[in-house]
Amino acid sequence: MASASLITPLVRPEFEHATVEAGQIGEVERPLSTWERLTNIEWVRKAAILITLAVIWEAYARYVSNELTFPTLVQTMQALWDSTVSGPLLERTFTSLKVLLTGYALGLFIAAVFTTIAVSTRIGTDLLSTLTAMFNPLPAIALLPLALLWFGLGTPSLVFVIVHSVLWAVALNTHTGFLAVSETQRMAGMNYGLRGVRYVLKILIPAAFPSILAGLKIGWAFAWRTLIAAELVFGVSSRSGGLGWFIFENRNQLETANVFAGLTAVIIIGLVVESVVFRTIEMHTVRKWGMQR
Amino acid sequence: MTVAHAVDGLLKPDTSAHSPLLSVKDVTLQYKTREHIVTATFRVSFDVFQADRFVLLGPSGCGKSSLLKGVAGFMAPVEGSMQLNGQTIDRPGPDRMMVFQEFDQLMPWKTVQQNVMFPMLASGRCTRKEAQERALRFIDKVNLTKFRDVYPHMLSGGMKQRVAIARAMAMEPDILLMDEPFAALDALTRRKMQEELLQLWGDTRFTMLFVTHSIEEAIIVGSRILVLSPHPGRVKAELNAHQFSHAEQGRPEFGALTQRIHNMLFAERIEEEALAKAGAAHG
Ligand SMILES: Nc1ncnc2c1ncn2[C@@H]1O[C@H](COP(=O)(O)OP(=O)(O)O)[C@@H](O)[C@H]1O
Ligand SMILES: [Mg+2]
């Protein structure tokens, strides 16, 4: 009964072919159509989205027709142009970027010191993970009142909160990246007689680069947000305020188009750093190396 | 003493060829984990001579990789000694180049040529020009000249292993350590790589210590085979296999040696099972 229900495979005759010349197959490779190639380019698709959004904005603002609460795209662009060419926007942006870069560089330096201590000793590892666990969830802006108390109104307070926002993200990512370097690659590096600093520079850092780069990106995004927020809070008192101060000032004067222009500037700078600076670094490193898609 | 020397000289005119290059004596290797100590190998001894293709053969987990790590200097023995050219091994160094089983041993951020050049430059053994010249020569030996400017992620598994072999050989180390370099390859590629390796050995007569768990691979690649017992690894036998290559695979002697080794490894399991049964009966 059981054997009757089991299927036996059908025995078929054997055959062998001579391989067909690849040239005779015809369509081995075919160029894509222009439309297919165009829609394969990322920026073309993104530009299409941006244009759609711009049209919606303009249409809605015209429909609402209230310059005080919602200026049109054209008015915003006009304001952006005017305050860039004849207004204080460029100077404000420059002030913000200077503070930002100072804080970012200082944050990276301290992160490097922390990570070095963490990779070389076990207590260092514990120290880093404890501090990161404590401070990473704390929004940097929450430290601003304290910073003002310690450093007074001015750049040092801003730098302090930026350092705080960069430091933990970068240190955590770098350390995690180091820990994830495979045993094989470590052994290969030591096999060539690499020790100490040369081992870190030539093996650990490049091997952990995807994770380090991710840390740098997160750190930058945190720092930029923190800075603008901090300038909104106390930019009033400093003579040469930054972008946040520009936004605050124009809101007080009910120059809503300028407020929009300031916000646009914040977005543009964020986008440029994200998609030009970091993207270029990515293209020439982790993507070229196949360590990240 | 002078007399003894003279007699020695008479008996062994070329002492360098008759004293071992690598000498492993009664080596016990252990791992300390959080809960217990794992003994990987127990009192293993063997000697590797110049131009040997010395194979460590044993089932998975018997401590072959651990022995190789010991020779490479990544792991210190808890008992016994390991000497290379009469010097006790106490740290990793470029006089012993290791080829790993894992494909990720290449540095993804360097091209094929840069990967091959890297150890020569990092160890300060060559100038940049020398390193480049040597790298090109060895890349050519493993037939990858067309791919020398390509990054590793664009290579197949077999090609990556060939780069790793070229990288190790270009250093011209005293001994080449290979940890199951072909185990993760498909059967056809593996066979081709074995042939290429033997051809390279025929050209330059380097010394290698080759780890495998495949009896067939041990007989084909090796000139001498150290058979290790299952965990913890102990020496079962040391056999000659210099007379066999792929060409002899169909021959009865090849089959006989395969069977002999198989029985050695298998006998242990039967004994163990019997012991386990006896233990169960007692308990
Ligand atoms: N890092 C480690 N920590 C603890 N035990 C290990 C470690 N590596 C290997 N072992 C143990 O040592 C024994 C030998 O391992 P290994 O040398 O890798 O064997 P093989 O290479 O012959 O397969 C195994 O029992 C394994 O579980
Ligand atoms: Mg192994």
Image (cartoon, coloured by chain):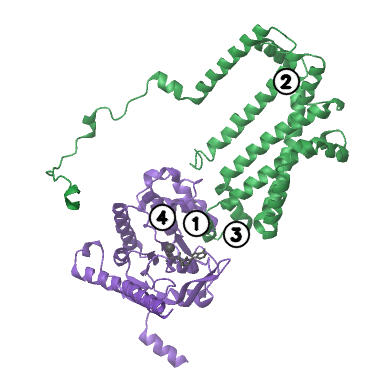
Chain colours: A green, B purple
Disc 2 to disc 3: CB gap under 8 Å: no
Structural crowding at the residue carrying mark 1, measured as other residues with C-alpha within 10 Å and reported as few (<14), some (14–19) or many (≥20): some
Residue underneath mark 2:
A262
Residue underneath mark 3:
A195
Q: Amino acid at mark 4?
A: Ala
Residue lying at 77% horizontally and 13% vertically, measured from the top left: A255
Q: CA distance from mark 1 to mark 3?
A: 16 Å
Q: CA distance from mark 4 to mark 2?
A: 58 Å
Residue underneath mark 4:
B166
* A186 left or right, relative to A105: left
Disc 4 to disc 2: CB gap under 8 Å: no
Name the quadrant containing residue B177. bottom left
Instruction: Select label 2 or label 3 by which is in front.
Output: 2
Residue lying at 20% horizontally and 35% vertically, measured from the top left: A21
Q: Amino acid at mark 3?
A: Arg
Chain letter for the residue marked with disc 2 in the picture: A
Q: Amino acid at mark 2?
A: Gly
Quick one: SS at disc 1? helix
Closer-to-camera residue (A256/B274): B274
Closer-to-camera residue (A287/B129): A287
Q: Is residue B137 visible?
A: no
Q: Can you tell me whether the CB of the residue at mark 1 lies under 8 Å from the nearest atom of ligand 2?
A: no
Q: Amino acid at mark 1?
A: Thr
Q: CA distance from mark 4 to mark 3?
A: 23 Å
Tell me how many marks there are: 4
**Lower position in the chain sequence, tag 1 or tag 3:** 1
Instruction: Select label 4 or label 3 by which is in front.
Output: 3
Image location (x, y in percent) of residue B239: 31, 75
Chain letter for the residue marked with disc 4 in the picture: B
Residue underneath mark 1:
A184
Q: CA distance from mark 1 to mark 4?
A: 17 Å
Q: CA distance from mark 2 to mark 3?
A: 50 Å
